[in-house]
Image (tube, grey):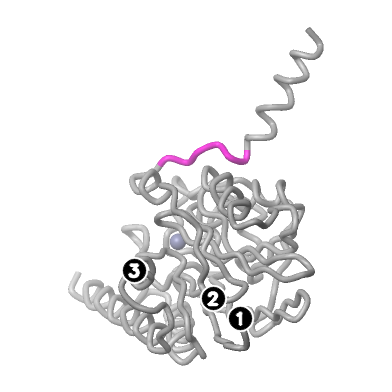
Amino acid sequence: MIGALLMLALSPAAASDEKPIHCGNCAGWNAPHAPFKLHGNSYYVGTEGLSAVLITTPKGHFLIDGGLPQSAKAIAANVNALGFDIKDVKWLLSSHAHFDHAGGLAALQRMSGAPVLAAAKSAEALRSGRASPEDPQYAPDNTMPFPVIGNVQSVKDRQQITLADVHVTAHDTPGHAPGGNSWSWHSCDSGHCLTIVYADSLTAVSEPDYRFSDHPDYLTAFRQSIDKIRVLDCDILVSAHPEFSNLFERTKTHSLIDATNCRKYADAAEERLDRRLKQERSK
Ligand SMILES: [Zn+2]
C-alpha cells in the first residue's frame, strides 16, 4: 500500500511540467518530426511546428528551445534517436518566453539538469511562468502561462557561451516578445565551416487592444531587431517556427545553405510590421 501510494505521489509530480497546453495550433505544432542534421554538429530536434536545435560538443551540448510542455518528451526522444543523451545537455537556450517555445524548458531542465539562458527580460518571465506585462500579447486575463523554470540565468547582447571549441553568441532581438533572443554559432563539417542562425520570431502580433504605435520605444527596438537579423552572418537559418522560413521545404527542395535567408526573413518581418502599423493608423 505504501509502495502504491509512493508511486502515486511520484509519478504525477514527474510529469506535471509536461501537462499539455491546449490551443488552436498546439496539436499541429506538436506533431512529431524526425530529427535531421543541419550541418556538422548541429541538428533539428524540434516538432512539426516548433523548432528546437541541438548543438553537440565533446564537452556536452546546447539545446535551443523546448516547444510546448508536451513537446519535451519528443525533443528528448529526437536527441536520443541521433545517438546523444539529453543528460549531456549543459545549456538550454531560450528564444522568447511564450508557452509554445518555453513551455517544454522546465521538463527539459528536469531531464538534463541544465540552466536556461535568456535575455534579462525573458529570464524574468521564464521564472514567473508567464509572459511579461509589456509583451504585446499580454492580457491580464490571458497571461499564456507555462511551467515555471527554476534555474534561469540572463545573458547580455553579444555574450558568448562556450562548450569545448563551440561558441554560441546571444543576440538581443526584442519585438515579438520583450526579451527575444536569437542565437548564432559556427559549425564545421570536414573543414567546411558555416554560420548557423537560430532566429527568434519577428512577427508583429498582439492582443486586440494593443497598438505598436502607442509604444514608440518598443517599436524602435523591434525595428533594430529586424535590422540586426537582416545583416547577420547567416549561412543557414532556422526560425523559431520552421514554417516562417520554409525550413522543411528548403531541406527537401534545395540546400539549406543560403546566405540570403536571414535578409529575406527580416524583410518579411518588416513588411508585416509596416502593414500592421498601417492598419493601426486606419482604425
Ligand atoms: Zn511567441
The residue that mark 3 highlights is: 252
Residue nearer the viewer, 204 or 230: 230
Some atom of ligand 1 lies within 8 Å of the CB belonging to the residue at label 2: no
Crowding at label 1, few (<14), some or many (≥20) Cα neighbours within 10 Å?
Answer: many
Q: Main structural element of the magenta stretch: helix, strand or loop?
A: loop
Question: Residue placed at 45% from the left, 77% from the top?
Answer: 237
Name the amino acid type tagged 1: Ser
Proximity of marks 1 and 3: CB atoms separated by less than 8 Å: no
Q: Is residue 63 magenta?
A: no
Query: Is 115 left or right of 230, judged from the image as shown?
Result: right
Within 10 Å of disc 2 (Cα), the crowding (few <14, some 14-19, many 20+) is many
Q: In which quarter of the image is residue 250?
A: bottom left
Disc 2 designates what residue? 39
Residue, disc 1? 187
* Three-letter code, disc 2: His
Identity of the amino acid at label 3? Lys
Q: Where in the figure is residue 93, as x and y percent of width and height?
A: 64, 66
Magenta region: 17-22
Asked if the residue at tag 1 contacts the one at tag 2, i.e. Cβ–Cβ closer than 8 Å, the answer is yes
Label 3 element class: helix
In what quadrant of the picture does the N terminus appear? top right
Query: Considering only order in the chain, which callout, 1 or 2, is on the residue closer to the N terminus?
Result: 2
Which residue is painted at 56% across and 47% down in the image? 146
Residue ID at (49%, 71%): 200
Tell whether 93 sits left or right of 209. Answer: right
